[in-house]
Image (cartoon, rainbow, N blue to C red):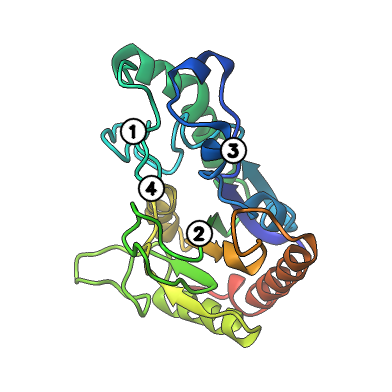
Amino acid sequence: MTFPLVISIPHCSSRIPESLGPALALSQAEIAESIDVGTREIFGALPARFVLCAQWSRLVVDLNRHPAQQGRKGVIPQVDYFGRSVYRADFPAEGEELQDRLEKYYWPYHRWLKKKLEEPGVLGLLDCHSLNGIGPLEAPDAGMKRKDIVLSNNGGHQGGGRSASERLTCPARFLRSMARIFMARGFSVAVNSPYSGGFITTHYGFDLMKREKFAVQIEINQALFTEEEGQRIVPQRLTAVREKVRICLEEIADTLFFASP
């Protein structure tokens, strides 16, 4: 089965351009901690119509931010999720540097994504991430234990809008059905908590909903397939998790993808 989806994996790389190396205040090990561990191996292996994997670290540009967003967690982040400064104090992450970074590393990803979402037969977008088992310092749930799967559509904890004016990126009943399928396979699931969907999900999802399509952000807990300490993947566990995710998406495709929202 080929899923009628575009899969986006924006935080799967640790690659840093050689020219930026001297500006970084982080070690190679610290840079690697910004990878969404396991996302390329789990979601990148799914039989979707199109799969797009980031080629550069989110510390170069964060593809899941608005291109005009600046500050600590802007499109060029100043701190990582552990609160550490990414760049040395004398490095200017604005002006020409910002525009050059966007043109080289940001816009190519988004141009490709937009093009593939307009292909015939594509019904939706799955924007794929992984999260630490415990919320890190800069997360909204710092210090808290997290569920296995987090599904997001820019809504509340039941998948509906938090206010009458709030827009969703996929219908609430669709998201709740997805959650039930994952739970039936043994995953614990949270909806829109701690994240309700980032820039990619909302930017493309609002437009997709107008065309009776959808976008969902999915986060998978790294504790399912990594060692207790650190981010090292345990291959056997990752293989088992990947197979369970594939089965869940097959069931979702069978029951939901071809139903009208």
Q: Is residue 81 above or below residue 236?
A: above
Q: Are marks 2 and 1 in contact (CB under 8 Å)?
A: no
Q: Is 73 displayed left or right of 182 in the figure? A: left
Amino acid beneath label 1: Gln
For residue 232, which numbered disc appears in the image?
none
Of the residues under marks 3 and 1, which one precedes in the sequence? Answer: 3
Of the residues under marks 3 and 4, which one precedes in the sequence? Answer: 3
Where residue 192 sits, quadrant-wise, is bottom left
Amino acid beneath label 4: Phe
**Viewer-side label of 3, 4:** 3
Within 10 angstroms of label 4, few (less than 14), some, or many (20 or more) residues?
A: some
Within 10 angstroms of label 2, few (less than 14), some, or many (20 or more) residues?
A: many
**Viewer-side label of 4, 1:** 1
Q: Residue at x 74, y 68 (%)?
A: 237
State the residue position of label 3. 54
State the residue position of label 2. 131
**Rounded to the nearest whole Å, what is the CA distance between mark 2 and mark 4?**
17 Å
Of the residues under marks 4 and 1, which one precedes in the sequence? Answer: 1
State the residue position of label 4. 199
Q: Residue at x 36, y 35 (%)?
A: 77
**Rounded to the nearest whole Å, what is the CA distance between mark 3 and mark 1?**
20 Å
Q: Is 93 displayed left or right of 253 in the figure? A: left
**Viewer-side label of 2, 4:** 2
**Viewer-side label of 3, 1:** 1
Within 10 angstroms of label 3, few (less than 14), some, or many (20 or more) residues?
A: many
Q: Can you give x and y, in whole percent of width and height, for residue 25 in the image?
A: 43, 27
For residue 78, which numbered disc appears in the image?
1
Q: Can you give x and y, in whole percent of width and height, for residue 7 in the image?
A: 61, 52
**Rounded to the nearest whole Å, what is the CA distance between mark 2 and mark 3?**
17 Å
Amino acid beneath label 2: Leu
**Rounded to the nearest whole Å, what is the CA distance between mark 4 and mark 1?**
18 Å
